[in-house]
Amino acid sequence: MLRFSRRSWLWTLRVRSSLSVPPYSNRQAIGALNLYAATPHAFDDPTEIAQVSALAAQADAVLSVVTNQADQVQLTEQLREALPSRSAIDQAIGILMGHQRCTATEAFALLRTASQHGNRKLRDIAADIVTSVSGQPPEPSPFDQQH
């Protein structure tokens, strides 16, 4: 049971009882559902506490769905951004395979090494290789085009 100091802001707002129930997500508390009342001992009834706990569980379910949906949107955006990079990298690998007479794995290793040594993004190095050979920046793969 909480005791409020007469100087606290809760006392000033005439809060005489509070109940805090943590909603859990993946077995971790992610916040609290806080209820306040102007009467003392307003949340002493175990049935009411059970109802508030059930409400917190429903809030957790809603938060889980919203969080999962946001994660899916973020992943979709990341994949959309990665597809053009993948196409440029594949084109550069093909160019390196022809020039160096090596396998795709070896060509990718060459790109990776250049990226690490030059402290540049691999996709930027790949784009430079494609541009230097074709005179134009890499084109997206026809499979990357949205219909």
Image (spheres, rainbow, N blue to C red):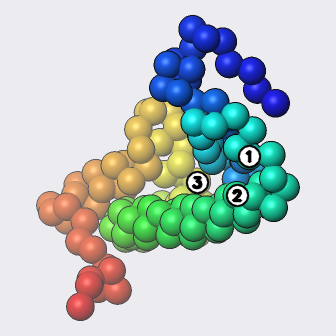
Instruction: Give how far apart the Cα atoms at labels 1 and 2 are.
Output: 10 Å
Q: Label 2 amino acid?
A: Val
User: The residue tagged with tag 2: helix, strand or loop?
Assistant: helix
In the displayed structure image, the side of residue 94 where residue 66 appears, left or right: right
* Front in this rendered view, residue 97 or 139: 139
Return the residue at label 3: 109
Contact (CB < 8 A) between labels 2 and 3? no
**Residue 11 visible (yes or no):** yes
x and y percentages locating residue 78 in the rendered image? 43, 62
Task: Using the rendered view, name the quadrant where residue 37 is placed.
Answer: top right
Instruction: Locate residue 143, reporting x and y percent.
Output: 34, 86
Nearer to me, 91 or 57: 57
Question: Mark 3 to mark 1: distance in Å?
Answer: 65 Å
Q: Helix, strand or loop at disc 1?
A: loop
Mark 2 to mark 3 CA distance (whole Å): 57 Å
Residue type beneath disc 3: Ala
Name the residue at 15% across, 61% down. 135
Between circles 1 and 2, the one closer to the viewer is: 1
Residue reaching furthest left? 135
Are the residues tagged 1 and 2 within 8 Å (C-beta)?
yes
Residue type indicated by callout 1: Phe
Q: Which residue is mark 2?
A: 52
Q: Which element carries disc 3, helix, strand or loop?
A: helix
Q: Which residue is mark 1?
A: 43
Looking at the image, is mark 1 or mark 2 earlier in the sequence?
A: 1
- State the quadrant of the N terminus: top right
Q: Is residue 76 left or right of residue 15?
A: left
